[in-house]
Image: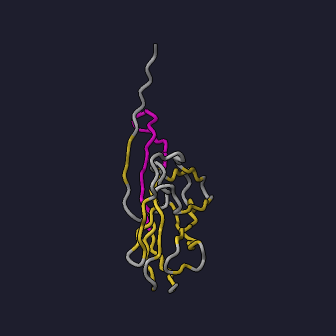
């Protein structure tokens, strides 16, 4: 019996990592009024020379959304999470669109006005590096955030 052990280096990056761009952000439906449920979508562009993996946690969306005002995040009553998401791979110079839609929470417009939002994505980059004649993959974990403002109209 052979046992293969591999050394992996983990490097944690900070907010506003340089490897991706979050853009083409839009609200769905396009016009949100008080009393509406809605989602936010954004395109994630991989501008690094490495394949990245956007991380997911259970049934939550990989696009984390934080609201400063006008929105209530409502947990979905679900005893079982049956749609667990796998990490999303994005090749170099490619992009994918992510949605805030998930099986565990919904966004509900409670007040009208300008709504300040922070979008955040957590991702990993795997690099193979030579270290003292040993080939060790290094895993870089990064967070990228961006600000987004949209209007909620009176009902």
Query: In the picture, residue 27 is in which quadrant?
Result: bottom right
Does residue 97 sit above or below 155 in this rendering?
Answer: above
In-front residue for pair 147/28: 28
For image coordinates 55% across by 51% down, the residue present is 88
Residue 86 appears in the picture as rendered: no
Where's residue 138, x and y in %? 43, 43
Q: Is residue 1 above or below residue 56?
A: above
Q: Is residue 13 left or right of residue 52?
A: left
As for residue 106 lying within the magenta part, the answer is no
User: 63 and 78: which one is in front?
Assistant: 78
Magenta span: 125-145
Indicate the quadrant where residue 116 lies: bottom left
Q: Position of residue 98 (x, y in %)?
A: 56, 61
Question: Which residue is more in the foreground, 23 or 38?
Answer: 38
What is the number of callouts on the image? 0
- In which quarter of the view is residue 43 placed? bottom right
> Residue at coordinates 52% horizontally, 84% vertically from top-left?
155
Residue 153 picture location, percent across and down: 51, 85
What is the chief secondary structure element of the magenta stretch? strand
Residue 142 covered by magenta stretch:
yes
Q: Nearer the viewer, residue 22 or 70?
A: 70
Q: Residue at x 41, y 27 (%)?
A: 5
In this picture, is 47 found above or below 114?
above
**Is residue 11 among the parts visible in the rendering?**
yes
Give how far across and how far down residue 74 sits, in percent.
43, 64
């Amino acid at each position: 019996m052979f046992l293969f052990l591999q050394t992996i280096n983990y490097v944690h990056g900070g907010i506003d990592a340089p490897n991706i761009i979050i853009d083409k952000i839009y609200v769905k439906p396009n016009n949100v009024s008080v009393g509406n449920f809605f989602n936010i979508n954004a395109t994630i562009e991989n501008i690094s020379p490495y394949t990245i993996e956007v991380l997911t946690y259970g049934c939550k969306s990989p696009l984390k959304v934080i609201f400063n005002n006008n929105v209530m995040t409502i947990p979905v009553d679900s005893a079982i999470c049956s749609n667990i998401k796998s990490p999303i791979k994005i090749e170099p110079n490619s992009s994918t669109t992510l949605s805030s839609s998930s099986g565990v929470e919904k966004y509900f417009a409670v007040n009208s006005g300008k709504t300040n939002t922070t979008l955040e994505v957590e991702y990993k980059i795997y690099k193979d590096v030579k270290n003292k004649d040993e080939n060790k993959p290094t895993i870089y974990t990064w967070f990228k955030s961006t600000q987004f403002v949209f209007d909620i109209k009176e009902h």
